[in-house]
Image: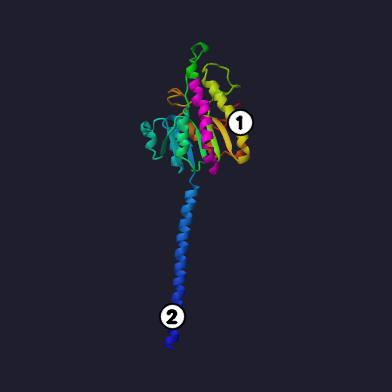
Amino acid sequence: MNYVFATRLIRLLDVKCVIAAGLVAFGLAGSMGLAEAGEKAQKTVLITGANRGLGLEFARQYAADGWRVIGTARRPDSAVDLKALDVEVLQLDVADTASVAGLAKAVEGRPIDLLINNAGVFPRVSTLAEVDFDDVERTYAVNTIGPMRVTRALLPNLRLGSGKQIVSITSGLGSIANNTSGRYYGYRESKAALNMFNRTLSVELSGEGFTCVVMSPGWVQTDMGGPNANLTPEESITGMKKVIDGLTPKDNGTYRNWDGVAIPW
C-alpha cells in the first residue's frame, strides 16, 4: 500500500509540475506577445524642418501621442528644443542631394508610417522688380524639389510602414484659384508646384494604398508667419493632426486647410 501510494503521489506531483511549467511558459509567451504587439503598434513619423515652428510642434504632439518621432534639422547641434523632446534628431538639408542620401542611409531598412514634408522658406517679395532670381531658385530647391528628393529617398521606408501617408506642408498662397491679391513671387509658385507634385505622386502610388495630401497650416505665429498671425502653432498642428489621423486612401491627392476644409487648386 505504501508503495502504491508513493507512486500515485509522485505521478500527481509530476502532473502539477507540468501544469505549473506550462502556465509559466504561457505567461512568458503572453508577456512577450504583448510586448511585441506593443512594439509593432508604435508608429513612426519623420518630420523635416522639425527644429522650430510648425515642425517642432508636430514633433511635440506626435511624441506626446506615443509615436516614434524622427525630426530633422540642418544643424542638429542647434536644435535644442527638439532634443528636449527626447526624440531622434537627424541632420538634413532638403536642398542638398548628399544630405538627403545621408538621411536615407541613416534610416535604411526602418519602416516609416508617416512622412511630413515640412521644411520650407518664405521670401517676402511684393513686386516683380524686387525678385532676386537666385533667391527664387533657392525657394524652389527647398519648397518644391526638397520634398521630391526626400519622398523619393524615403519611399522604401514608407513602403515598409503600415501607415503609408505622405503629408506635404503647402500654403493657401499656392492656390491659383484663390490668388486675388498677388505678391509673394517665388513662394506662391513654389507651393503651387508642390501641390502639382503631390497630385502626380498620388496617382502613381494610389495602387499601393498610399494617401498623399498637401495641407496648408493657415496663418501661424511662427518666425515665418509673424506675431500678428491668427493661429498659434499648437492650434494649427492640433487641427492638422486631427485631419491626418482621420485620413484614408479616399483622401489621396487632396489639398486641405489646417481644419480639413478643401482648398481650390
- CA separation in Å, label 2 and label 1: 76 Å
Asked if residue 24 lies in the magenta stretch, the reply is no
Quadrant in which the N terminus is drawn: bottom left
Numbered label attached to residue 200: 1
The C terminus appears in which quarter of the rendering? top right
Q: Is residue 159 highlighted in magenta?
A: yes
Q: Residue at x 46, y 78 (%)?
A: 11
Instruction: Give the residue at mark 2.
Output: 9
Give the class, few, some or many, for how many residues have Cα within 10 Å of label 2's Cα (few <14, many ≥20).
Answer: few
Q: Position of residue 103 (x, y in %)?
A: 46, 36
> Residue 260 appears at what percent x and percent y?
56, 33
- Residue drawn at x 58%, y 31% is 198
Q: Looking at the image, which is closer to me, 232 or 253?
A: 253
Q: Residue at x 45, y 60 (%)?
A: 28
Snapshot quadrant of residue 189: top right
Query: Earlier along the polypeptide chain: callout 2 or callout 1?
Result: 2
Q: Amino acid at mark 2?
A: Leu
Q: Nearer the viewer, mark 2 or mark 1?
A: 1
Left or right, residue 100 beside residue 249: left
Mark 1 packing: few (<14 Cα in 10 Å), some, or many (20+)?
Answer: few
Local secondary structure at mark 1 = helix
Q: Amino acid at mark 1?
A: Thr
The answer to whether any part of residue 191 appears in the image is yes
Against 76, residue 14 (above or below) is: below
Can I make out residue 239 in this image? Answer: no
| The residue stretch that appears in magenta | 137-163
